[in-house]
Amino acid sequence: MLSTLLLAAAVGYAHPEQLVDTEWVAAHGRDADVRIVDMRRAGYADGHVPEAVALDPESIRDPKNAPTFVPAPEVFAAMMARLGISNRTRVIAYDERGGLYASRLWWILNYYGHANVALMDGGWITWSAEHRVTTTAVPSVAGAAFTPKADPRWVATAAEVVASIGKPDTRDIRIVDARTLGEMDGSDTRNSKRPGTIPSAVPVYWEDLLDPTRKTFKPADEIRRLYESRGILPSHEVIAYCQVGHRSSVDLFALHLIGYDRLRNYYGAWEEWGNSPDLPVALIK
């Protein structure tokens, strides 16, 4: 693990423990206190990282549980227990999209008090490109006890977002929109009744945080410049959102990676906001 942390520190990350490389996973994936979680939408049965368990990325958001939309504590605890994840487990998540799905697991584990979680940098893309060993075997997992301890500082409700829009007493809050320009200018409604963006939101598209080929996270200086160029500073509280909390989690992951610590996910996201006629909407031109 030391080599991974040294490499991460070399590119200036404030929280290098959030990322591990494929070499680390190959060496430690079978450790008793490590659980590798495959968050891809498909492909697990065709081949995956050895000892990885599969978790449906949609299972960690409950569209019926407003206003937070997180699964109930007992539901999440049972989910983690089935995967063999206890409060002492080092969780390593990966997907095939540069962290699009894995980052949401990182976020919700932090929300439920489990900060010992990282992403495999580059995910399945890098693992495959390096021709590392894969398997179709499903690992035998012993049951585990997971006790969730919700920290509301990690989540924002629609009411809290409304209170953060352009108010003089919330000047230290920045709302980040991780979606595409098409979603923000109204040309792509994504099945929402209303197009647009949350007023005063700042666009930071999630894929701009990644190397376009390897899907690894960019060095800290590049990530920092991107956010600071949009007026988002370490002193700010950041509320991020997208359509259902996938892309916003990547923004939050990257922000925490470089040292931003006041981070919240509006988990209701545009799926809630865009279908609620009483909530304000702006269009980016």
Image (tube, helix red, strand yellow):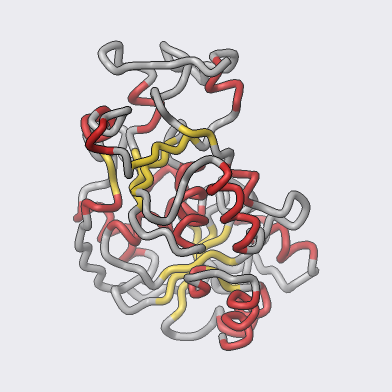
User: Measuring 57% from the left and 88% from the top, which residue is drawn there?
Assistant: 2
Residue 17 position (above or below residue 172): below
Q: How many marks?
A: 0
User: On the rendered image, what quadrant is the C terminus found in?
Assistant: top right
User: Measuring 31% from the left and 73% from the top, which residue is drawn there?
Assistant: 86
Residue 256 on image: x %, y %: 45, 60
- The reply, left or right, for residue 125 in relation to residue 186 is right
Residue 34 on image: x %, y %: 46, 78
User: Measuring 31% from the left and 39% from the top, which residue is drawn there?
Assistant: 171
Residue 184 position (above or below residue 106): above
User: On the rendered image, what quadrant is the N terminus found in?
Assistant: bottom right
Residue 26 on image: x %, y %: 64, 79
Residue 238 position (above or below residue 269): below
User: Measuring 60% from the left and 55% from the top, which residue is drawn there?
Assistant: 223
Q: Residue furthest front?
A: 168
Between 278 and 33, which is closer to the camera in this rendering?
278
Residue 252 on image: x %, y %: 45, 51
Residue 203 position (above or below residue 98): above
Between 237 and 102, which is closer to the camera in this rendering?
237
* Image quadrant where residue 172 sits: top left
